[in-house]
Amino acid sequence: MFTGIIEQLATIKKIVKENENVHITFTSEFVNELKVDQSVAHNGICLTVVAIENNTYTVTAILETIQKTNIGFWDIDTKVNVERCMQLNGRLDGHIVQGHVDTKGVCKSIENQDGSWKFTFEYSAPMHVTVDKGSITINGVSLTVVDSEQQTFSVCIIPYTYENTNFHQLKIGDYVNLEFDIIGKYVAKLLQK
């Protein structure tokens, strides 16, 4: 489990395809604190560390993960938001994030608001919902929904988040990973019955 509070940006150093899987090697400041079999969220995707070598670590993504997320758009030197799993004795500063991406969204607009930025996203999975002032995870970042419409929502980004996550690299048309609020997903499922 994660909180959506990004620890740092990791940089992709190598991508190796093996059958349907992709092995991705990263550098980050906390490599020496990792261990093989540890879960780390990468742009909100929970991936297991499978190797550590020469100040880098490697994770493996399977086909379902590749199809559901923005991994297919990653390349060498791509900067990815990373967060290690939550410690039970820590504060839950963001919200409950599972690291299980529900779908991809696309950035439809970026509005500079003279001190903050308003990002609007669209997604095509109608079974997922957002609510005004509810929680959403975008590329692993825990955020509050500002405007909520069917299959479209916006969030506002403060300068700290903008500078310390990959939001400062996002452009209109870029794909992001979306994980909807777990409580909202259960409520939506119950209402469907």
Image (cartoon, rainbow, N blue to C red):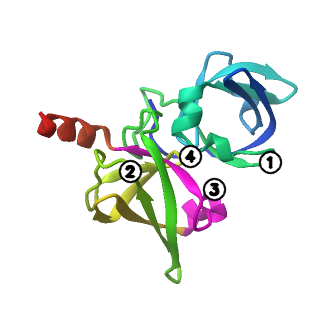
Q: Amino acid at mark 2?
A: Ile
Tag 3: amino acid = Asn
Real-space Cα separation, disc 3 to disc 1, in angstroms:
12 Å
4 and 2 marks in contact (CB < 8 Å): no
User: Is residue 27 something one can see in this rendering?
Assistant: yes
Give the image location of residue 91, x and y in percent.
41, 38
The answer to whether the residue labelled 3 contacts the one labelled 4, judged by CB atoms less than 8 Å apart, is no
Answer above or below: position of 84 versus 173.
Answer: above
For disc 4, the marked residue is 6
Query: Which label was assigned to residue 166?
Result: 3
Which label's residue is closer to the chain start, 4 or 2? Answer: 4
Q: Disc 1 designates what residue? A: 77
CB within 8 Å, label 3 to label 1:
no
Q: Earlier in the sequence, mark 2 or mark 1?
A: 1
Q: Earlier in the sequence, mark 3 or mark 4?
A: 4
Residue at 70% x, 28% y is: 22
Q: Secondary structure at mark 4?
A: loop
Q: Earlier in the sequence, mark 2 or mark 3?
A: 2
Residue lying furthest right in this view? 54
How far is disc 3 from disc 4 in space, using C-alphas? 10 Å
Q: Which residues are magenta?
A: 159-180
